[in-house]
Image (tube, grey):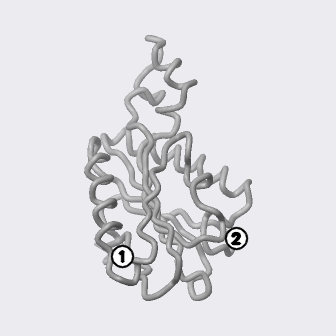
Amino acid sequence: MDPDVLVEGHLEIVPISHVSSILQSDEETQVEIERFQSCLRRMYETMGKSVLFLETAVHFHSRPHAHIEVVPMERGMEPEASMFFKEAFFSCDEEWAQHRKVIELSSARPLKRAVPAHFQYLAAEWGDPAATSGADKDKSKDKSKSSKAGSDAAPYGGIVHPVESEGTIDTNFCLE
């Protein structure tokens, strides 16, 4: 296996435009990325897996191209992912101690509403935003809908850690 691959099925979403974070990309690019993430969620769901999206948006001057790591995981591991990343963000070394805030993400508060575009951040997202929206909850009550429509999808969640200064933050933090 390629040493840069974390697990089988690991891939990256990389926008064509040169931006330092996905939040700095234009609205059209963000919508396209969200659509692609939705397709990946459905694909991994057919394999009995869930998916974790990781973005390390730091070192804007020396790392001018954004990307999102896509890491498949066993279905039902979302609570463990949440605990893992919260613990990792809270136990960061002194370089990160200036700003220990962890922001919870939800379908009502996605990443683009939680962090300003010019901020540096570390983000981990999982689940399906559509699985927790009001419209889809109503749809899931309809017995004629199959599990492929997202009724079995994990609820959306995630956390983001804003970073005040570049310091010596490891650009591969999410990959460790």
N-term-proximal mark, 2 vs 1: 1
Q: Is residue 87 above or below residue 37?
A: below
Residue name at image x 60 percent, y 81 percent: 60
Q: Is residue 117 left or right of residue 114?
A: right
Percent position of residue 174, x then y = 38, 69
Which of the labelled discs sits on residue 4, or is there none?
1
- Nearer-the-camera pick, 109 or 97: 97
- Nearer-the-camera pick, 149 or 58: 58
Q: Is residue 95 left or right of residue 1?
A: right
Residue name at image x 43 percent, y 46 percent: 157
Instruction: Tell me the residue that label 2 is attached to.
Output: 17
Percent position of residue 131, x then y = 47, 32
Q: CA distance from mark 2 to mark 1?
A: 23 Å
- Nearer-the-camera pick, 30 or 10: 30
Callout 2: 10 Å neighbours few (<14), some, many (20+)? few
Query: Secondary structure beneath disc 1?
Result: loop
Instruction: Quarter of the image for the N terminus: give it.
Output: bottom left
Callout 1: 10 Å neighbours few (<14), some, many (20+)? few
Amino acid type, label 1: Asp
Percent position of residue 3, x then y = 31, 77
Amino acid type, label 2: Ser
Query: Secondary structure beneath disc 2?
Result: loop
